[in-house]
Amino acid sequence: MGKIKRHHLSLGTWGEEYAAYYLEQKGYTILSRNIRTPFGEIDLLARQNPEGNLVFVEVKTRATKKYGPPEISVTRRKQEHLIASISSYFQEHPEIEESWRVDIIAVEKPDSRETPTITHFENVIQV
């Protein structure tokens, strides 16, 4: 998975690219990226398989462990904004009636020589 170079991308953008690549390697299809809503941004929208769930993905990336793992930055407030963003997305796309879930992908890249570490948390926000 070392195909994505970080030198020309911001850390967050690089992490989203890496997470999308990871998901594609796991058989997901990326449907959209950086969906903007009045309540915030949805990093990735994917489908797990051709007939599978829609998956709204929040990507968190860190280059240091100084402040803990990336996933701890998905606070209760961030979760509320994410759910509001997803609700807004569905209001704009009433034709979508399929099941969905929210995943978090945590990407750690402490050193440019190290392989990034990805942790994929599935179905993390219960609505």
Image (cartoon, grey):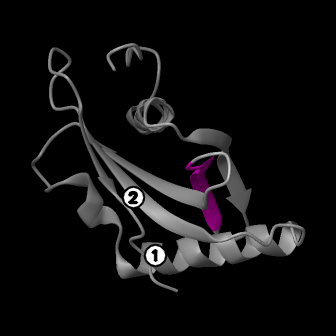
Residue 74 image position (x, y, % from top left): 35, 67
Q: State whether residue 20 is above or below residue 81.
A: above
Residue drawn at x 15%, y 24% as measured from the top left = 111
Judge left or right: residue 45 versus residue 90. Answer: left
Residue drawn at x 11%, y 46% as measured from the top left = 65
Judge left or right: residue 46 versus residue 64. Answer: right
**Residue type of the residue flagged with mark 1:** Gln
Nearest the viewer among 79 and 95 is 95
Nearest the viewer among 116 and 38 is 116
Q: State whether residue 55 is above or below residue 59.
A: below
Residue 69 image position (x, y, % from top left): 18, 54
**Residue type of the residue flagged with mark 2:** Ile
How many angstroms separate mark 2 from mark 1 (CA)?
Answer: 10 Å
Circles 2 and 1: CB atoms closer than 8 Å: no
Q: Does residue 88 belong to the magenta stretch?
A: no
Q: State whether residue 16 is above or below residue 41.
A: above
Q: Main secondary structure of the magenta part?
A: strand
- Residue interval drawn in magenta: 40-48
Q: Is mark 1 on a helix, strand or loop?
A: helix
Q: Mark 2 points at which residue?
A: 104
Q: Which mark is residue 114?
A: none
Report the residue that reaches farthest toward the bottom. Answer: 127
Residue 71 image position (x, y, % from top left): 28, 59
Q: Mark 1 points at which residue?
A: 79
Judge left or right: residue 93 versus residue 100. Answer: right
Nearest the viewer among 120 and 112 is 120
Nearest the viewer among 81 and 86 is 86
Residue 13 image position (x, y, % from top left): 48, 34
